[in-house]
Amino acid sequence: MDSVEPAGLEPGARAPSCPQKGILQPSDSSELECLQQFKVTKIQLQQIQASLLGSMEQALMREASLAPGVRMLPTYVGSTPHGNEQGNFVVLELGASGASLRILWVTLTGIKGQRVEPKSQEFVIPQEVVQGTGQQLFDFAARCLVEFLDAHSVGNQGLQLGFSFSFPCHQTGLDRSTLISWTKGFRCSGVEGQDVVQLLRDAIQRQGAYSIDVVAVVNDTVGTMMDCEPGVGPCEIGLVVDTGTNACYMEEARHVAVLDEDRGRTCVSIEWGSFSDDKALGPVLTAFDHALDQASLNPGAQRFEKMIGGLYLGELVRLVLVHLAQNRVLFGGYTSPALLSQGSILLEHVTEMEDPSTGVVCVHTVLQDLGLNPEASDAELVQRVCVAVCSRAAQLCAAALAAVLSHLQRSREQQTLQVAVATGGRVLERHPRFHSILQETVKLLASECDVSFIPSVDGGGRGVAMVTAVAARLAKHRRLLEETLAPFRLSREQLEAVQTQMREAMAKGLQREPSSLRMLPTYVRATPDGSERGDFLALDLGGTNFRVLLVRVAEGGVQIINQVYSIPECVAQGSGQQLFDHIVDCIVDFQQKQGLRGQSLPLGFTFSFPCKQLGLDQGILLNWTKGFNASGCEGQDVVHLLREAIRRRQAVELNVVAIVNDTVGTMMSCGYEDPRCEMGLIVGTGTNACYMEELRNVAGVAGDSGHMCINMEWGAFGDDGSLGMLSTCFDVRVDQASINPGKQRFEKMISGMYLGEIVRHILLHLTSLGVLFRGQQTQRLQTRDIFKTKFLSEIESDSLALRQVRAILEDLGLPLTSDDALIVLEVCQAVSRRAAQLCGAGVAAVVEKIRENRGLEELTVSVGVDGTLYKVHPHFASLVAATVRELAPRCVVTFLQSEDGSGKGAALVTAVACRLAQMARV
Ligand code: 0WK
Ligand code: BGC
Ligand code: BGC
């Protein structure tokens, strides 16, 4: 007997088919052409390897590929088992091994190496169900579940199920998966394009016997890979050859285009069954393959699988036997009805017939069962047909696996790749030679890779339970996150209630009745009319920066020169004298730099704190806000305090004409460009609003006609407890830790000084629940104000991928996983969204007041806006506008972002005052 060519073939030579002890060899002359077709050369295997590799990388980049290729489907499994997964899980396996489903009860101990044998039961799915309606299939599965759970009395509490669904699916989460197309003889209607988890949940619901939480759907290759004992692996590739074939592997997340992820790994289901690049496969596809495909349920699809999968090997053998019989090479040219009927030779038959010891006997048994009466030579030839078909299958499978190994080697830039492959499926488990041919051919095609094959213990059931455990943990985290963030998700009704309450508080405040809204008259009666002229000094205190400005109002418009100065915390919280002396120092420094020494220009003072104004240049500070707490100022006229400081500084001439709130300055500044601007809004360190109210509605100010700008001081809205229903425990913590507890409650839900702190407290809470940072509290996160509000704007910016989110958080020394980054993003979104909506409800209350004041059906009005949070946050402004549109549909509101800040507005108020004073003197 001639031995088959040694391993390491010459180009063009046929690949090894592993001579088998005890298998009779035909005489060379009679080796039949048709068997020759199943011989695949090393070159051909390498071509398939290369083409499949190309198809993998194209699909990863979501580049459309000409040749129907592999699908590369993300599975949302982000890590191989940690080994500490624990709990009891129900596993439902559908589709892995033909028309049967298996249910397991798996206990994970969470202790390395400690395994509890799963309880399992197999159910054969009737053919009419396999090709019936989707509802029939899922109802059948749900009934089997009930039968299993009844039989294994596992109770009915908190059952968590992992669904192993072995078909190509688009997954959008661990528990959301849409079937792309059936394979392997399944063809239930109404399922393709549907979320199979929902279909199963509905079917379980219809049974109504058990409340089972389907927390994860997993492809069988993933279950197989995850079933790898941590001690052995970790396995980073899962390979299944059962009725169908497929593999998955751990890919660098950054290589998976659909996942906006750049760190860590994620498991990808290759779905190589659909690989069918004619150039690579064409030469090895035989007429029998085409015949099988044509007669299959899905002609043209799964061509690669139809050369390897156990559902097809028997059929290929049968087609060859029929061909040989019809050509009088076998069975004396006799064909039995059974031999002629599709699917009459099964995988088991092929496996048995190839069995080295019992093979020949089995051949006779199988052929007799098919109504044939084989000669010994027939039996020997039939065995060789089986060998040819299965050897090719193993070699093709090896070429595909070698493609995955080459890809991993390349993407990990490793000269020598060491990897463990978890294997599962009856072809791999039961076929006598498939495994060894696979190993040998892989060694041949991927010689630089050191591959160890780890057979999965129970077909991946445990692996599915592992994924379910991870999914359960993530689902629990999701639930805890939703519970934590739910109070931040304000309903339309809640926002309408805020709007109504603000209207009531406005009305009371205007009538000087007890109200959390002070509605302070500002003595600004008109917005600029454009006739203002002159040079003015302006101060802008109360925002992020203290600025001194020189404002020239001329025919051609307004020119501004300004200088930013800092107010150290020790000055902001020192004595009033210190603070105002510091302010005058800055003014003097500015005058020197601008060559204004000795000039006494009219000065407008933007003082962004609640002041009871007795006149344009008299403002009694009611209380500090925003971290300011200089002593000896509250209850004082701050213009007087400024003038005192100027007096203390001798040789400085300053004519303080007006004190305005930054909201008023902002309204005036924008009103200079757009006369319809009748409201000012600040959302920065603090928040507040002002608007032009009908004088007749302002108690305590003489006159019934005309308007007066009212500084609402809405930061204090709710200080009377009226916002209690919206306040969360996190708001309470931020308020209690502030230097003015119980005060500025509305501001503490909206403005930049507090949003970062609210987020930090939520992150601490979620860490204590184990939802974040694996429950590890970090010193950094315990640090007050460590999570800046600007982080929210950065983290929520659309252009920032998760990676940058991670970078920001890592700078904070937070050990985070990719899921953590997503959760932090959601927390930021919830907190900033609530802030914007509350702000929008406030604006809606004001513009509706103006509309009703004027008895208008519809009001067109502009709002001048300033403040870092409003300007910098990527979504804040649009959320405010959307909320106003929703709550004040009869008002057309334009938001004008103030370019020059309120310093210009203060100068304009001063200019108007000077003009009016001028006219009064004339
Ligand atoms: C810029 C204005 C200033 C105001 C500030 C508020 O010129 O008057 O106080 O915006 O924004 P913040 O600087 O607090 O973010
Ligand atoms: C399916 C895969 C599955 C494989 C092995 C193929 O037909 O498309 O999802 O992993 O069979 O069961
Ligand atoms: C102050 C307001 C100011 C707002 C915006 C609040 O804390 O009380 O007067 O307009 O911050 O700066």
Image (spheres, rainbow, N blue to C red):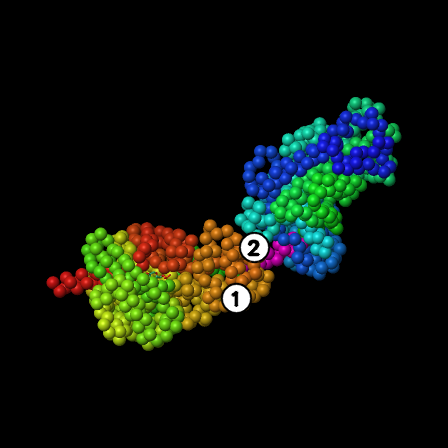
Kindly tell me whether mark 1's CB lies below 8 Å from ligand 1: no
Image quadrant where one finds the C terminus: bottom left
| Label 2, residues with CA under 10 Å away: few <14, some 14-19, many ≥20 | some
Q: Residue at x 68, y 31 (%)?
A: 293
Q: Amino acid at mark 1?
A: Arg
Q: Can you tell which quarter of the image residue 137 is in?
A: top right
* Left or right side of 423 for 732: left
**Image x and y of residue 186, in percent:** 67, 38
Mark toward the start of the polypeptide (1 vs 2): 1
Q: On screen, 623 above or below 875?
A: below
Q: Quadrant of ligand 1?
A: bottom left
Q: Residue at x 31, y 75 (%)?
A: 577
The disc placed on residue 309 is none
Q: On screen, 169 above or below 324?
A: below
Q: Nearer the viewer, residue 197 or 815?
A: 815
**Image x and y of residue 406, in percent:** 65, 43
- As measured in the structure, the alpha-carbon distance from the residue carrying label 1 to the one carrying label 2 is 19 Å
Count of residue discs = 2
Q: Which residues are magenta?
A: 466-481
Q: Which residue is mark 1?
A: 780
Q: Nearer the viewer, residue 584 or 197?
A: 584
Residue 724 visible somewhere in the drawing: yes
Q: Residue furthest left?
A: 922
Q: Which residue is mark 2?
A: 818
Residue 470 shown in magenta? yes
**Image x and y of residue 900, in percent:** 31, 57
Kindly tell me whether mark 2's CB lies below 8 Å from ligand 2: no
The secondary structure type at the circle numbered 2 is helix
The secondary structure type at the circle numbered 1 is helix
Residue 443 shown in magenta? no
**Image x and y of residue 319, in percent:** 75, 29
Q: Residue at x 62, y 47 (%)?
A: 413
